Amino acid sequence: MTEQQRKKTAYKKKSQLMSIWHRFKKNKLALFGLVVFAIMLFIAIFADFIVDYERDAISQHMTKRFMSPSAEHIFGTDGFGRDMFARIIFGARISIFVGVVTIALALAVGAVIGASAGYYGGYIDETLMRIMDVFLAIPQMILAIAIVAALGTGMVNILIALTVAQVPKFARIVRASILTVKTQDFIEAAKACGTSDSRIIARHIIPNAIGPIVVQATLNVATTILVIAALSFVGLGIQPPTPEWGSMMADAKSQMRYHEYLIIIPGLFIAFTVMALNLMGDGLRDALDPRLKN
Amino acid sequence: MTEKLLEIKDLSVIYKTDEETVYAVNDLNLTLNKGETLGLVGETGAGKTTTALSIMRLLPDRTGRITRGCITLGDLDITRASEADMRLIRGNGISMVFQDPMTSLNPILTVGEQIAEVLQLHRLDMSPEQKEKRVDEILEMVGLPADRKHEYPHQFSGGMKQRVVIAIALACEPQLILADEPTTALDVTIQAQILKLMKELKQRLNTAMLFITHDLGVVAQICDRVAIMYAGEIIEIGTTDNIFEGKKHHPYTVGLFGSIPDMTKATRRLNPIEGLMPDPTAPLGGCKFHPRCPQCMEICKTAKPLNIIDGTHAIGCHLFAGGAGHDARINLESTGGAE
């Protein structure tokens, strides 16, 4: 095997995923977002190994109230003497878990609705999309508040509320992506080569439509995290004493003028996570489009 | 020895929507022999592409329908074949080259993968190595270096993309290629290259080709026979010599030639054919061309002309019905250049 041939085979082995990664990592900001999000994810998953949930994040220590950040409590303690660092770590678990699960559920449901509407068209499209329009007409926050108010607070109900609020967005995006791809000439060309419908969907439509969907999903994890925080802030989200960034800020709002770190730290974490996800989403959008290659 | 490959008999195709019915192709008859290139020429909306899509049975699901006639490829009746059979024929027995190479390639698959896909669909007995080899072979054949198969369509120029499209069409060595204006989207120098390539490959593989175009210059370069299409009908058909050199012509053909700028004659302006094609939603009685025809007679408005056959040349016009016929030369004077 000559050198050139070997180079050729090596080139071929580079998979689609590898080339997407190659393009993604050229975008330094997106890489930064990925690192930040990876750290958040890491502390969320391994929270139990870092601090003890019961002792540090839940139990109240009245002697240690309002301690400013120090070596022992790097983010200080709150009004009940609970370690802010521990609560932030466990808060990350809730925020990221709810954010990711909501989007995964909304994507799954929205993709089925959007794909059926886009692919079959006609009455199916009309019916499904008009129902989605009804949901889209209601602001996401109000819809979530209404659902939580109807079902009661609690993790599962919040998940349902947020998912329902997100489904129409995904249905619209999936439908639009499928419609634009479906009418393109290369789909016709694939048909003219004798490709079957299922193969056309799997090999030509979905890979061409997936880019915007993945990007939207990433960006929507960020908005969902904001909505959870906002719901908790107004008291409809995660209930105390469970640590959650939004409810931590709500707890701290009466002491904001004396112990500003109590509200700044969870705020910063929300902002950083959302920013990281947005940067990642933008980076993914560029990386998934081979036309922007090089 | 000529052997019949494709035969279209009395084909009628309509597009039906809630608002209207468009009669796109009306009683079209056509035969194509093995290894032959037939040019299908006509204005936009004459039904050229509809004819090609009917042969592939790729008319739009909801609206397009073949109402009458049959299309046979070899022994197979395409109008009656099952969808599964059609999938085996598409890409294998008949393949299609589309007008715009910019959009007829999937942007996120490498060109090698796209050529290999046709092989995967139709050459189930080939091993992956054989397929790889075949992809290299076919790329070299259309004049592209084989190691560019790992590149994406956007890394190729328009002419090169059309070469890739042709490579995909030829991968399974089909008996028939439907080329739907394959050079229209390309600039003139690339056009010439692509035409030369198609001609060479066609001869090498002995493939028949239905070449759809509205460019008479292209027809002269590549076709053995030419069919002139107007409002869903073939109004004149003959060998390229018949059409370009013959004395008798359908007035529409005369008009078509009159619309081409002539280098050798001093003309102040071109001579377009007056008027527009008849409304395809309201079928016209008699000869379809009569409202625009400079030599229209009473009979043209009521009776549909029969094909007057003279050897290899057939014209559907009442002018020639008497046998003697008018002498409709291809010159500007006869088309209303009397200004």
Image (tube, helix red, strand yellow):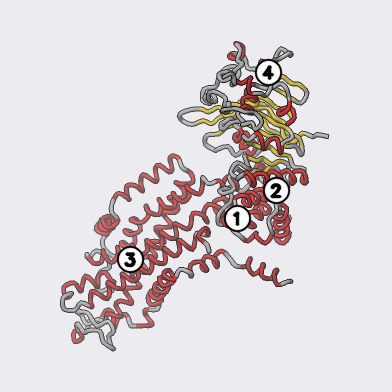
Residue B137's image quarter? bottom right
Asked if labels 1 and 2 share a chain, the reply is yes
Q: Which mark is residue B156?
A: 1
Name the residue carrying label 2: B170
Name the residue carrying label 3: A225
Asked if labels 2 and 4 share a chain, the reply is yes
Q: CA distance from mark 2 to mark 4?
A: 38 Å
The amino acid on which the numbered mark 1 sits, given as a three-letter code, is Phe
The amino acid on which the numbered mark 3 sits, given as a three-letter code, is Ile
Q: Is residue B241 left or right of residue A211?
A: right
Chain bearing mark 3: A
Q: Residues within 10 Å of mark 1 (few under 14, many from 20)?
A: some
Whether pointer 3 and pointer 2 mark residues with C-beta atoms closer than 8 Å, the reply is no
Q: Position of residue B143 (x, y in %)?
A: 70, 53
Could you tell me if residue A186 is visible in this image? no
| Residue farthest front in this picture | B266
Mark in the foreground, 1 or 2: 1
Chain bearing mark 1: B
Q: Residues within 10 Å of mark 4 (few under 14, many from 20)?
A: some
Q: Is residue B72 above or below residue B322?
A: below
Q: CA distance from mark 4 to mark 1?
A: 49 Å
The amino acid on which the numbered mark 2 sits, given as a three-letter code, is Leu
The residue lying at 52 percent from left, 22 percent from top is B282
Name the residue carrying label 4: B306
